[in-house]
């Protein structure tokens, strides 16, 4: 008789649920490399769709396609900065603007009890897209430490 195997996500020793999601995020971050065009550049140029929350001449905010909280959106500068470590002194105002926009969008989306703002840096920091982006997550109690 043929033997039925459990689905791959239920095999012994395989990560399950949140563990599997984290393993996938780590793999994406380790595979990502700075330089070149990114998915965010395509979103800024409107070459691919996004659920946009806010836009001005400096930045764009849109819902994350893989939300990690009930509310999860990104705020990105229209100027390409590959990662925080590549930011220059003259980017200070722009980076501050991202946080102010994140705060305003969080309020507009009803995150009255709080939220978390995160910027991932490099592969060990979980950066999977090399265009600076501010994650804003809310709608549930956040744990500490985060990762």
Image (cartoon, rainbow, N blue to C red):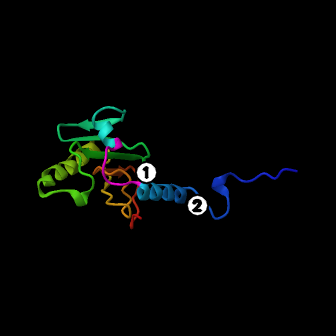
Disc 1: which residue: 68
What's the magenta bit mostly, secondary-structure-wise? loop
Q: Residue at x 36, y 35 (%)?
A: 50
Q: CA distance from mark 2 to mark 1?
A: 17 Å
The residue segment tinted magenta is: 32-39
Horizontal side, residue 46 vs residue 13: left or right: left
Q: Residues within 10 Å of mark 1 (few under 14, many from 20)?
A: some
* Direction bottom: furthest residue: 145
Q: Is residue 36 magenta?
A: yes
State which quarter of the image contains the C terminus. Answer: bottom left
The secondary element bearing badge 1 is classed as loop
Where is residue 93? Give x, y as percent: 13, 51
Label 2 element class: loop
Label 2 Cα neighbours within 10 Å, binned few <14 / some 14-19 / many ≥20: some
Tell me which residue sits at (44%, 46%) in the image: 66
Residue 6: image tag: none
Is residue 109 something one can see in this rendering? no
Residue 116: image x %, image y %? 32, 56
- Which residue of the protein is positioned furthest toward the front in this rendering? 36
Residue 13 visible in the current orientation: yes
Residue with the mark numbered 2: 15
- Residue at image point 17% right, 52% down: 96
Of labels 2 and 1, the one closer to you: 2
Q: Nearer the viewer, residue 64 or 79?
A: 79
Percent x, y of residue 124: 38, 64
Residue closest to the eye, 35 or 140: 35
N-term mark: 2 or 1 = 2
Q: Which of the 4 image quarters holds residue 56?
A: top left
């Amino acid at each position: 008789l043929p033997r039925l195997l459990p689905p791959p996500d239920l095999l012994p020793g395989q990560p399950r649920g949140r563990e599997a999601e984290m393993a996938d995020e780590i793999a994406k971050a380790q595979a990502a490399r700075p330089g070149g065009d990114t998915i965010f550049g395509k979103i800024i140029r409107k070459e691919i769709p996004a659920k946009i929350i806010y836009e001005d001449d400096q930045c764009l905010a849109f819902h994350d396609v893989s939300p990690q909280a009930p509310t999860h959106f990104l705020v990105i500068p229209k100027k390409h900065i590959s990662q925080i470590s590549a930011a220059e002194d003259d980017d200070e105002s722009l980076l501050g603007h991202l946080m102010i926009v994140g705060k305003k969008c969080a309020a507009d989306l009803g995150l009255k009890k709080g939220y978390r703002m995160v910027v991932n840096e490099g592969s060990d920091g979980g950066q999977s897209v090399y265009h600076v982006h501010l994650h804003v997550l809310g709608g549930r109690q956040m744990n500490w430490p985060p990762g």
